[in-house]
Image (cartoon, grey):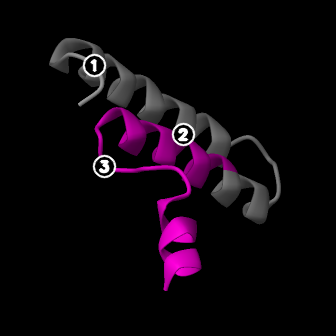
Amino acid sequence: MKTDSKTLSEILKLHAEYVREVEFSGIKPLSIEIYKTNSNNFVRWIKDEFNPGSKLRKEAIG
């Protein structure tokens, strides 16, 4: 984990609020999915569950 549990808890709470705002923003469905995916990846990165570009590096090696 890249932060302490108290901060992570606050980030998760704020991320859920952000996702709700995105879903009700009126933007196009594809844009909603992009916003949600990218922000979710950021949260996963904080939780040390995601490495940007790791899938691309695996495909380049294989």
Q: In this view, does 45 lie above or below 11?
A: below
Residue 19 numbered mark, or none: none
In the picture of the structure, the residue carrying the numbered disc 1 is 3
Q: Position of residue 49 (x, y in %)?
A: 30, 49
Asked whether 58 or 2 is in front, the reply is: 58
| Residue at 40 percent of width and 40 percent of height | 45
Q: Disc 1 versus disc 2: distance between alpha carbons?
A: 24 Å
Circle nearer the N terminus (3, 2): 2
In the picture of the structure, the residue carrying the numbered disc 2 is 20
In the picture of the structure, the residue carrying the numbered disc 3 is 49
| Residue at 62 percent of width and 35 percent of height | 21
| Range covered by the magenta-colored residues | 35-62
Q: Could you tell me what secondary structure mostly forms the magenta stretch?
A: helix
Give, as a three-letter code, the residue at label 1. Thr
Report if the CB atoms under discs 3 and 2 are less than 8 Å apart. no
Quadrant of res 47? top left
Asked whether 46 or 39 is in front, the reply is: 46
Q: Residues within 10 Å of mark 3 (few under 14, many from 20)?
A: few
Asked whether 17 or 34 is in front, the reply is: 34
**Total numbered circles:** 3
Question: Is 51 colored magenta in this rendering?
Answer: yes
Question: Is 11 situated left or right of 9 in this image?
Answer: right
At mark 1, the secondary structure is: loop
| Residue at 28 percent of width and 23 percent of height | 8
Q: Disc 3 versus disc 2: distance between alpha carbons?
A: 23 Å
Circle nearer the N terminus (1, 2): 1
At mark 3, the secondary structure is: loop
Give, as a three-letter code, the residue at label 3. Glu
Question: Is 1 situated left or right of 43 in this image?
Answer: left
